[in-house]
């Protein structure tokens, strides 16, 4: 399916997963060229792209036109965008003019409401996939495809090597996520639950701005946050030593986060605020417990009981290779 296929791949920094996708495409026999979707990845540049693009429009045009010039002599089978937050429709049309035989594919790992400008690009893609079922309902031509887990998660022992934590959280400090996390930290302290909370902020300036303007950050302290992301091996070590993984999705999305799918890959129990998890084929109430945002409490027995194995065919469906097959099929 992939052997000898030429792919032009664009992605923003997707927590390093774009590199895992590249490695898997090579392993499967494809040839590809990769470009970061953004001209720069600084905090200021990301903010301008999202909130005031007129300051960076010229740089975006120059960046993509240089890529078009560099790649126009090649004939690709696929042009693949992971999210497509930056490119304009005009630039996308120019790229298509130089790649007339390529199939243009878009995968959305964020909800459309979170970056609505992407709607302008939809007519230019041959195939669009989304991790969010609600977006698929709104756009019937979309294909629903949840995210994936990496191969290395299958190597994690089914039972924790050492039961260091009952529950672990690793994720970014979104505005609507933080209040739930702070409540759960308190719950764990009050009930002697062994817990690990890694709440990541990209920049300390974000903390001060949110502390000043947003109620959800008022009760937080600098010590609640980490400014350096965990490495992949560090995340694996934590998941290897915990019984349950906590996931709190953004309220603007219904799709399962990649952390939730990684929890499946690692065969760990999942605690989540996302009620739509009940609609997935791997849902098992012995493995997954849904909490409320307002009063997030967890039965202590659930934290201690072992994971219950699921059908191997369902398990394999959420691997990175199957994800790529569904995208490029």
Image (cartoon, rainbow, N blue to C red):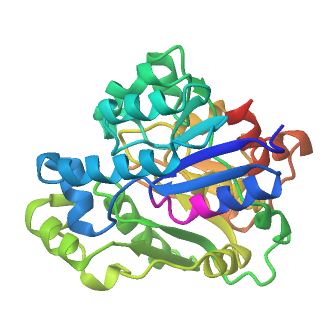
From the viewer's side, name the closer residue of 120 and 96. 96
Residue at image x 42%, y 24%? 122
From the viewer's side, name the closer residue of 86 and 266. 86
| The magenta stretch spans residue 14 | yes
Quarter-of-image position of residue 190: bottom left
Number of labels in the image equals 0
Image quadrant where one finds the C terminus: top right
Residue at image x 78%, y 48%? 321
Report the magenta residues as a range.
Answer: 13-19
- Which percent across, then down, holds residue 201? 33, 72
Residue at image x 47%, y 76%? 198
Vertical side of 214 occupied by 280: above or below: above
Task: Find the residue positioned furthest to the top.
Answer: 140
- Which percent across, then down, holds residue 179? 31, 60
Vertical side of 136 occupied by 147: above or below: below
- Which percent across, then down, holds residue 234? 62, 82
- Which percent across, then down, holds residue 206? 21, 70
Q: Is residue 228 left or right of residue 310?
A: left
Q: Is residue 249 left or right of residue 149?
A: left
| The magenta stretch spans residue 305 | no
Residue at image x 28%, y 33%? 117
Quarter-of-image position of residue 232: bottom right
Vertical side of 301 occupied by 76: above or below: above
Image quadrant where one finds the N terminus: top right
From the viewer's side, name the closer residue of 100 and 163. 100
Visible residue check, residue 24: yes
Vertical side of 250 occupied by 35: above or below: below
Task: Find the residue positioned furthest to the front.
Answer: 73
């Amino acid at each position: 399916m992939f052997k000898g296929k030429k792919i032009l791949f664009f992605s923003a920094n997707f927590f390093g997963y774009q590199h895992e996708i590249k490695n898997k495409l090579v392993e499967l026999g494809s040839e590809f060229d990769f470009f970061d979707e953004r001209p720069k990845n600084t905090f200021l540049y990301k903010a301008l792209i999202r909130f005031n693009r007129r300051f960076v429009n010229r740089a975006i045009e120059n960046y993509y036109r240089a890529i078009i010039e560099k790649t126009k002599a090649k004939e690709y089978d696929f042009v693949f965008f992971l999210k497509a937050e930056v490119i304009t429709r005009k630039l996308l049309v120019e790229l298509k003019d130089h790649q007339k035989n390529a199939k243009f594919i878009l995968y959305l790992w964020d909800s459309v409401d979170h970056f609505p400008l992407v709607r302008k690009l939809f007519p230019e893609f041959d195939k669009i996939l989304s991790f969010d079922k609600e977006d698929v309902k709104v756009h019937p031509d979309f294909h629903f495809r949840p995210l994936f887990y990496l191969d290395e998660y299958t190597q994690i022992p089914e039972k924790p090597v050492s039961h260091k934590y009952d529950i672990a959280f690793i994720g970014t400090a979104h505005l609507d996520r933080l209040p739930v996390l702070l409540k759960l930290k308190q719950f764990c302290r009050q009930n002697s639950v062994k817990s690990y909370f890694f709440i990541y902020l990209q920049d300390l300036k974000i903390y001060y701005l949110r502390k000043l303007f947003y109620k959800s950050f008022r009760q937080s302290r600098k010590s609640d946050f980490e400014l350096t992301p965990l490495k992949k091996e560090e995340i694996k070590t934590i998941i290897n030593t915990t019984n349950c993984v906590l996931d709190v999705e953004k309220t603007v999305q219904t799709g399962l986060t990649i952390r939730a799918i990684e929890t499946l890959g690692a065969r760990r129990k999942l605690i989540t605020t996302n009620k739509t998890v009940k609609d997935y084929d791997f849902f098992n109430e012995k493995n997954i417990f849904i909490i409320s945002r307002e009063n997030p409490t967890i039965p202590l027995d659930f934290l201690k009981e072992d994971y219950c194995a699921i059908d191997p065919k369902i398990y394999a469906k959420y691997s990175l290779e199957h994800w790529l097959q569904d995208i490029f099929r």
